[in-house]
Image: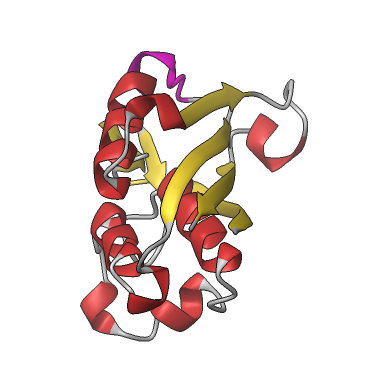
Amino acid sequence: MIHIGHGFDVHRLVSGRPCIIGGVKIPSKLGLLGHSDADVLTHAVMDAVIGAFALRDIGTWFPDTDSSYANADSIGLLKKILSDKRLKGWRLLNIDSTVIAEKPKIAEYVPAMRKILADAFSTDEMNISVKATTTEGMGFCGRGEGIAAMAVVLFEK
């Protein structure tokens, strides 16, 4: 038996916030705005996992009205989802993800992102794909107003 899930997330870029993507703090003048640490890649992965098992959405799990999640570490939130009893016996086969941003450039940080995500899933880094692309200057990502991310996960039992 297999389950597949697709996830998407987007966060606005603002000054005065850290830029955390895939659990890695990226040096940048602008950071991502959100209730938690606004880790757009990890949120897309979380969304995909939740979707694979029809467990509603991130806002249901971690509402922005709950102050205990203010500035929360998204990798920790991902681990909370992965520890849910409904995922018991399921094994991640792979993740394919894409970060959509003009800046900051993330290529040098991708190996660290893959390792952090692999550790969260207790899997080999070979099962984690993180890619980056731009929108050639078009749209909110192209104008540098925000960063988006998409992810697909595949589980087997």
x and y percentages locating residue 40 in the rendered image: 47, 48
Q: Which of 130 and 52 is in front in this view?
A: 52
For the point 42% across and 60% down, which residue is it?
A: 90
The answer to which quarter of the image holds residue 77 is bottom left
x and y percentages locating residue 3 in the rendered image: 60, 58
Query: Would you say residue 14 sits in the magenta stretch?
Result: no
For the point 72% across and 24% down, which residue is it?
A: 137
Q: Nearer the viewer, residue 47 or 153?
A: 153
Q: Which residue lies furthest to the top in this view?
A: 108
Where is 118 relative to 84, above or below? Answer: above
For residue 28, say whether it is visible.
no
Left or right of residue 104, residue 57 in this image: right
Where is 45 relative to 145, above or below? Answer: below
The answer to which quarter of the image holds residue 99 is top right
For the point 51% across and 67% down, which residue is it?
A: 50
The total number of labels drawn is: 0
Q: Nearer the viewer, residue 154 or 73?
A: 154
Where is 10 relative to 93, above or below? Answer: below
Q: What stretch is highlighted in magenta?
A: 104-109
